[in-house]
Amino acid sequence: MADGAALTGTSLRTPKSAALAGIAFSILVALVFWLFRISIPADPLDASAWPAKSASTITAALNLMPFVGIAFLWFIGVLRDRLGQQEDRFFATVFLGSAMLFLAMIFTSAAVIGAIMLTFSADPGAMVNSATLLVARAIAYNLINVYAIKMAGVFMISTSTVILYAGIAPRWMGFLGYALALILLLGSYYISWCFIVLPVWVLLISVHILIDNYRSPKPQHQPSGSAG
């Protein structure tokens, strides 16, 4: 009976270093999008042989993308753990929904780019200046530069609101999140590198949570009572 009580009283705790996931996401997503930017023409209607010219860097970016998703999911878990019982259903729905949509769109875009690379390697001559290449490239472009960026902005707004009301990070980070989210929502068409504000903001929050976790005292384990 004593062993059973000990097992029942044991809870799974988030490690103090869990905020490292947000730092990893910030570094990885910035690296992936930099590799895509230097490898893929900015013009979505460019049907030249760019898949052959930049095959190694594009392949590296595609291989890193799953780790971006893993780190982002872990970062979301850290934020929810930080909220605890303060989590509001409305903001939790917007927070999780926008995060999942953002992740799904960048994964889909990466899958389209990967399909282009595979098809081009099979028959390079047929792909150059083809309508198939143009359509696939335009799909990937719209997913990232229109829809994924907008969902990233919604994610930042909902997270900033949670920061202001729940106090899981300094208030200035919440206000900064609002300002940066407006850049994503309104300025993505005019500022080609505006996406970088998301990893920078996530990095700030993650560093704060990591430092705060190690400053906080360790939780005291309650002794398990023996069966009477």
Image (cartoon, helix red, strand yellow):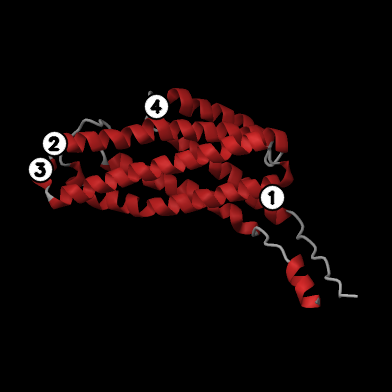
Single out the residue that lies furthest toward the left: 125
Q: Earlier in the sequence, mark 2 or mark 1?
A: 2
Q: Amino acid at mark 3?
A: Ala
- The circle drawn on residue 212 is 1
Q: Is residue 70 above or below residue 96?
A: below
Report whether residue 173 is seen: no
- Amino acid beneath label 1: Asp
SS type, badge 2: loop
What whole-number distance in Å separates the C-alpha atoms at marks 3 and 1?
A: 56 Å
Alpha carbon separation for disc pair 2 and 1: 54 Å
Q: Amino acid at mark 2?
A: Ser
Local packing at callout 1 (Cα closer than 10 Å; few below 14, some 14-19, many 20+) is some
Picture quarter with the N terminus: bottom right
Pinpoint residue 62: horizontal percent, then vertical percent.
33, 51
Q: What kind of residue is marked 4?
A: Ile
Q: CA distance from mark 3 to mark 2?
A: 7 Å
Earlier in the chain: of badge 4 and badge 2, it is 2
* Quarter location, residue 177: top right
Crowdedness near tag 2: few (<14), some (14–19) or many (≥20) residues, C-alpha within 10 Å:
few
Q: Is residue 87 above or below residue 4?
A: above
The residue pinned by badge 4 equals: 191
Precedes in sequence: disc 4 or disc 1: 4
Q: Residue furthest right?
A: 228
Residue drawn where x is 69% and y is 53% of the image: 213
Horizontal side of 48 relative to 171 (left or right) equals left
Please indicate whether residue 197 sits to the left or right of residue 85 in the image: left
> Which quadrant, please, contains the C terminus?
bottom right
User: Mark 3 and 2 residues: CB-CB less than 8 Å, in contact?
Assistant: yes
- Which badge, 3 or 1, comes first in the chain's sequence? 3
> Circle 3 is placed at which residue position?
126
Which mark is in front, 2 or 1? 2
